[in-house]
Amino acid sequence: MSNSPTQSNTRNRKNNNNNNNNNNNNNNNVNRNVNNRNNNNNNIISNNVSSTTMNMAKDFMNWNDGIIEREDTQLQQQKDRCFKILKKSTIACIVLLFITCTTIYSMTQYPSVSGGDAGELIVVAHQFGVAHPPGYPLFTFLGYIFSHIIPSNTVSVAWKISFMSSMIGSIASIFIYLTVYLWVNNHWCGLLSAYMFTFSPLIWMYQIQGEVFSMNNMFVAMLMFLGVWYTRVRIFENERYNTAFWTSERIAYLSAFICAIGLTNQHTLVLIVIPFAFWLMFISGRDQLWNVRILSNLVFYTLIGLSPYLLLFITPKLNRVKYSWGNTSTLRGFIKHFLREEYGTLQLYGGDGGVISLFTKISIYFENLIIQFGYIGLALSLIGLLNLLLGYNIRTFKWKSFGTMIIFSFLFYITFFFNLCNLPIDKPLYRGVFLRFFMQPNVIISITMGLGIKSIFGFLNRIQRDGGGSGGDSGGAAVTTISKIQKYLLPIIIILLIGNQIRFNYNLQDQSDNYSFYDYGHSVLDGLPRNTLLLVGGDLVTNVPMYLHLCEKVRPDIDILSMEIMSWEWFKITQSPLFQRVKFPGNVYHPYIPDGYSLKDFLDANINDRPIYIGGDFKSGDSSFQNDYYTISKGLTSQIIPKKDSHKYNTFKIIKTTFSTFPSFHIPNNTEKYPNDSWEHFMMEEMAVSLERAAETLLKEYLSQQNNESFKALELSVEILEKALTYINDKCWSLKHLGICFDHLRYRVVQNVNNNNQQAQNKASNYSKQLLYFWKKYINQCGHEEKSDQDWETIKKVIQLI
């Protein structure tokens, strides 16, 4: 039977469909085989990449070295976390750090001006001038903004800029936390490092006042963070494409910018920048950063970072203000200021720093670490350092690791900087100045503290796993129990360490009621006659009154001139035009150069126009005025008087009057809180020296006289010197001259009365006892004066005779 055309076509279509299905099945089989091969290849590639990633992690981060132990799944977790830093838990810790640190800092910061350079830096920032070399343009720019943007009139200009330092110090703590957290993936370890650093005594002291060190600490912490961040991103962007904005290349650009802008705050940062830049360019990024495009971008961002130094060119032209340093509007003046030529490039101190050995300086540093972090903190830091350097055994040491760079930075700083530091640290105040440069390496020490405690707990976990694996079910249960205990033990220990650090140092660093510098400045200015010209010499008597005068508008009728600034060649150009009531008889205050003038020349030109007072010391090397002028002490300053007019002044009556009104503000005499290397102690010394000057003036004039007024002058000298000893109880000059006063008083009583006068004899006997007391104290406490004091042997003989 023949088929119809329709049936035939249907059968053909079915056959074609069957053939197509067979072909499709064959293709699917082929595709599956190809996919299987691709999957196998991907697995091989993935395994190779994972192996490469692990090797990079070991090289650059010291991971899996037997101490900082990782869970098996943690490396995979790193892949998910490396491109994202600000997770909810991290943000919570950042907010916690910022609020707690800023709050505690603001509760304890100085209410007004403090000692040292703070007064000058606040003045320059508030007026938008130029600070002493190298200029600190970033600090002055931000300080200007903070001092004007905070609207409250209930707080001082100094408090506003100190609050800026407090906030910046809190940001430094955040970057320390992030550095440790990104390194060991533990919030608690990061918080330990941040809080131990923030509330260590040295850091706390300088981050609650208007100083540049807070910002410098922030930049050091930022560089440590950028190094760890760059490393993490670099490790894992080899394994998968980084879709985040912050690639390792962009982090390198940011690092160049931070290195540069940090140097516009303080130059000592260069000792951290050099090893960091070397590690970034020649070790971790040498296969990535060395091409023309990237190098050009790095140079560009470096120049952008240095741009705040343009302010040194601009501000002198647009805004000439008193107490602004240098002639930085010219290229030569800028270079001189930038290189600190006036102090000596690569030197902290322009004078003779003595012969303190490098070993002694390093020993002082490590002894101070115990004060900063305690024995437990120092032990944790040592464990962290050893772990970075050696690992579980010395064979795991990786020269390319970021930890090795940190160790090198630390050693580079404490050897290179301490060797260059020429401060005479045998003197207490300069020792205190030396200590403040310990803050940069202390950032590294605090970071290793967090690594150290993580190392300890990682090591314990390893022991538990090794021990629990051989104990069967009971051993596994024991390991689980111990792991749970350790889970809560780590935060408990860290909270206790942080709480102890804050509790122990809070009262010592609480300056919220410390108005002593403010009161000192008012004591200098308030007693001056109207329209006085005040010459000042020395940091304290210059910076504190200058702050009150220029920022808080105290005594606008007077002029304050720093004799140090007058001695620089740029003063005639940038500063002298601002003092229209002052006559300058030459180009520069320097008696031994052409067109220079001496202090005598200056006094001759101005003495008839207004009263002239001196605060602090005359400039060393210029004694030209001594034949024609003398001084009478009046409280914390002294009036300069022509000798030809000496008959118009009764020295005894003047000093008696001013002594009766000698400043009596609250003196910070807590020696634990304010040791002899603090500015508070130095202020008390200045108070004592002012009193000694008054006694010296009396003794010079009346010691050789034999009249009733001279006897009263000696008695007044005794009162004055005894007052001086209430400030500093071992002042050698006061002890010696108290003995001299009592010796002369005893002699005059004996010579001027009848031997049968019992009252006079008792008085003479009392004078003898007082003489013996003070001279014995002088001999016992002032042995360092023996070689320089020509009266030493005479005093000893008098003591033996009495």
Image (cartoon, rainbow, N blue to C red):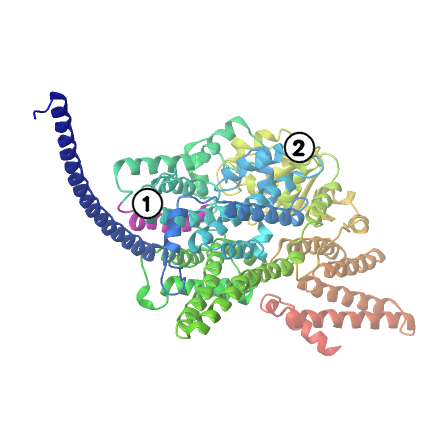
Which-is-in-front pick, marks 2 and 1? 1
Q: Is residue 481 left or right of residue 149?
A: left
Q: Residue furthest front?
A: 1
Please state if 707 lies on the left or on the right of 139 as rendered: right
Vertical position of residue 180 compared to residue 469: above or below: above
Name which residue type carries label 2: Pro
Identified by mark 1, the residue type is Glu
Q: Quadrant of the C terminus?
A: bottom right
Q: Residues within 10 Å of mark 2 (few under 14, many from 20)?
A: few
**Extreme-top residue of the structure:** 5
Magenta residues (range): 267-287
Residue where numbered disc 1 is placed:
237
Q: Is residue 284 magenta?
A: yes
Q: Residue at x 84, y 68 (%)?
A: 751
Give the image location of residue 422, x and y in percent.
47, 56
Q: Nearer the viewer, residue 34 or 298?
A: 34
Residue under numbered circle 2: 151
In the image, is residue 460 above or below residue 312? below
Q: Quadrant of residue 156?
A: top right
Q: Position of residue 140 (x, y in %)?
A: 54, 37
Q: Which mark is residue 553?
A: none
SS class, disc 2: loop
Does 731 sit above or below residue 663? below
Front in this rendered view, residue 339 or 149: 149
